[in-house]
Amino acid sequence: MILTVTLNPSIDVSYPLDHLKIDTVNRVKTVRKTAGGKGLNVSRVIHLLDHDITATGFIGGYFGKWLENQLDHDGIAHNFFPIDAETRSSIAVLHDGGKQTEILEAGPTIAPEDASAFLDHFDKLLDQTDLLTISGSMPQGLPEDYYTQMIAHAGAKNVKVLLDTSGATLKSALEAPVKPLLIKPNEEELAGLLNRSVDKTDYATLKQALTDPIFDGVDWIVVSLGSAGAFVKHQDKFYHAAIPKIQVVNPVGSGDSTLAGLAIGIHDGKSDEDIMKTAMTTGMLNTMEAETGFVNPAKFAEYFAKVTIETY
Ligand code: ATP
């Protein structure tokens, strides 16, 4: 099975408003609440595309129970590690014709004994896992190299790891002896890692950036480029995945949906071309839906056929 890690899950609340008024009351008629956190977006898309997935991470309190009930309702298997502190919620106000104002809680602080007990829980799950995805930032209280420790545990059991994170946690993972199989940095993250700006519209520069020794030992590097698709390195091969022009409804979560597509393609042992086409399709299908981290599988074949891969 595929195991997805969301260490800091969240109840994502979205409030649509014609106009956001400051320093007064705003009343909302429709409220949408979903099981969120980047890893749970990944989980939902993998599940919608009919693959076995189990979601794990830390969960706590009544909000945590609500989140688990929501996953049960969606038919998504989960095996979270329980903590005493309450799981967070995140609010997105969608207002004034396309603006999005977010209020994000930091979430619980993980106690050292929970951090260490989670690794035992995780080890047991790894025994049934072929491929692991790790997404998002970490909750407070965990050491910077916590993902790196998890990648080492996965490596010891020959589990492939797809890592989608940024900053010091990503840097730590790249410096460790056991590397993730795949990373998915965006332009900003690349610039942060390389200490220089990277122009994502210039593929020659991108190609050069991805050959930096900092990435040695990482098989796949996927730089997603929004409507321009993605620039990809697999071992010593470089590709540009181009996508058709589509009607975008809500692009939030398309990076997570891309990771879900990469996980499915790699898990199923597809060719490079089909792995990238799957990932571009799941990314596009997510942008075509109002719900975050959601795809309509009925449209998969049509959009898969429209992705083109060029070696670079
Ligand atoms: P996130 O902030 O969600 O993590 P990201 O920066 O990782 O996003 P993007 O590059 O914005 O991810 O999008 C991922 C994929 O989703 C793209 O490679 C593409 O397949 C699809 N996508 C995103 N935006 C668009 C768009 N405007 N038109 C078509 N496809 C899109």
Image (cartoon, rainbow, N blue to C red):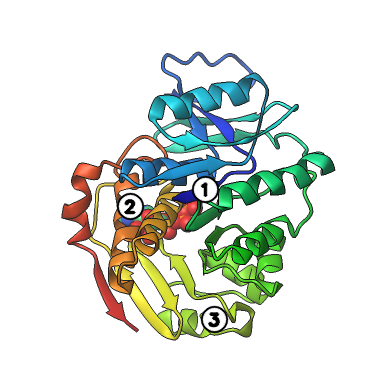
Q: Give the residue furthest to the right.
A: 112
- Does the Cβ of the disc 2 residue fall within 8 Å of ligand 1? yes
Q: Secondary structure at mark 2?
A: helix
Where does label 1 land, which residue?
A: 4
Where does label 3 land, which residue?
A: 209
Q: Secondary structure at mark 1?
A: strand
Q: Mark 3: give few (<14), some (14-19) or many (20+) Cα within 10 Å.
A: many
Identify which residue, 40 or 246, lies in the foreground: 40
Q: Quadrant of ligand 1?
A: bottom left
Figure check: 36 above or below 132: above
Quarter of the picture containing the C terminus is: bottom left
Taking 130 as reference, is 84 left or right?
Answer: right
Question: Residue 86: image x %, image y %?
Answer: 70, 26
Disc 2 residue type (three-letter): Thr
Disc 3 residue type (three-letter): Ala
Q: Secondary structure at mark 3?
A: helix
* Mark 3 or mark 1: whose residue is earlier in sequence: 1
